[in-house]
Amino acid sequence: MTDKLSRAEQAREFGFETRQLHAGQRPDPNTGARAVPIFQTTSYVFEDPESAAAYFNLQEYGNTYSRIMNPTVAVFEERVANLEGGAGAVAFASGIAAQAAALFTLLQPGDHVVSSSALYGGTVNQLKHLLRKMSVELTWVDPDDPGAWREAVRPNTKAFFGETIGNPSGNVLDIETVAAIAHEHELPLIVDNTFATPYLCRPIEWGADIVIHSATKFIGGHGTSIGGVVVEAGTFDWSNGRFPVVADASPAYHGLRFHETFGMYGYLMKLRAETLRDLGGALSPFNAFLFLQGLETLSLRMDRHVENARAVAAFLDSHELASNVTYPGLPGNKYRPLVDKYLPRGAGAVFSFDCAGGRAGGQGLIGGLTLWSHLANVGDAKSLVIHPASTTHRQLGDEELRAAGVGPGTVRLSVGTESVEDLIWDLEQGFARVAATTGAASDAPSGAPSAAKGGEKVETA
Ligand SMILES: *Cc1c(COP(=O)(O)O)cnc(C)c1O
């Protein structure tokens, strides 16, 4: 490409804020459209029979069918890959589909995976049950213990898996250390970077080989769409002898050797041409368009999410009805040194705390909130709250809850971008209700909007 922007990109390294708006896209050459058009089409007319054959042989890269690739989705893929510093990316219909595809591409029956035990609940289910169905073994490790990662490695181990910021305990993964251990054993480290986003942390810069996102969360940012994406660094040696499934002649693609043929794009080509083709969880062009709208303001929203999360965490930390605030950015938090290293712009906006009064306290607090939305999601511009013991972890007894790192009074927050005074005012209302219903003492004046700016009235969300 020889357009002006491409020439500028060669002469100058653009900043994150520039790339979140421009990477992977040029104004549409046919129409001049500045925004990314939604190519709502299932398929593409071939110029001639020869180029059609070349596309299907992967000798030339061209659009065939939107389960495999689509021009709107391609802009989203390129933009995320650019922001994460990867060689490329493949998008999926959900974060869970992205994870499954990333693993299926490098695993075969009899293999073994080592994973952090502090993960998003849906990922725990996926690793625990789906991998077993594939006859893949799994070892959970304490992500904070480098020795545990090393000791878990077996001859049939094929990957390490962890999250930049774990859920709900707020543990921060020591990516550089864990990546070094993975590489000692010629294994790739896969990092779910959903809670950090590429603005707050880029795991590839610290040695991660594959980065996964649920785009459903902060990348979309508005709670409108489900989607996911897999980014690969392009530096892992898939021909090191441990990964015949990536390196050897593929029976699923007429004997193609993906790593030998496509080099740094080999894993990604297999992920698209085989795994996406066969599992079929393709991202829709419309959702890709919405995620691109989200990416345009990612840094602006994340700065605001972090600023609000810090203020809410500090408020809770000093509130007598709240304890065990897991925000890793708090001064004195045990992950603070890792936050300073990996997340210098802030530790995201999702964390939990324990509300006084146990189960009744946690439920009472949420019942007393008007602005925070009670639902099972994170990463929306709107502030979200959930009481795990009565919802996502409802089946567990108090003992089992403790083992899962969830107390009966644990409340999880995803701090949004509203006026922070209003968020704190609303929490004060909730605590006043806890104090009234559980008899726990409160320093919050009951029902008084003491922190609200000018006593503004807040509409119920
Ligand atoms: C939501 C989430 C997922 C799953 O993504 P979906 O888009 O819901 O399929 C995976 N990991 C983390 C950290 C998440 O928050």
Image (spheres, rainbow, N blue to C red):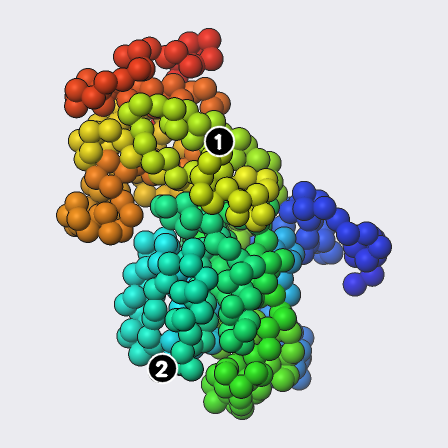
| 160 left or right, relative to 49 | left
Q: Residue at x 34, y 69 (%)?
A: 139
Q: Earlier in the sequence, mark 2 or mark 1?
A: 2
Q: Which mark is residue 310?
A: 1
* Classed neighbour count for the residue bearing mark 2: other residues with Cα under 10 Å, few (<14), some (14–19), many (≥20): few
Q: Which residue is mark 2?
A: 109
Q: Residue furthest top?
A: 454
Q: Against 99, is 255 above or below?
A: below
| 60 left or right, relative to 429 | right
Q: Against 183, is 205 above or below?
A: above
Q: Residue furthest front?
A: 147
Q: Is residue 11 visible?
A: yes
Q: Residue at x 50, y 82 (%)?
A: 243
Name which residue type carries label 1: Arg
Picture coordinates of residue 39 (x, y %)? 57, 57
Quarter of the figure that contains the C terminus: top left
Quarter of the figure that contains the N terminus: bottom right
Displayed quadrant of residue 179: bottom right
Q: Against 184, is 20 above or below?
A: above
| 175 left or right, relative to 441 | right
- For the residue pair 331 and 13, the one nearer the viewer reads as 331
Picture coordinates of residue 375 (x, y %)? 31, 39
Q: CA distance from mark 2 to mark 1?
A: 45 Å
Picture coordinates of residue 169 (x, y %)? 37, 46
Q: How many marks are shown on the rendered structure?
A: 2
Name which residue type carries label 2: Pro
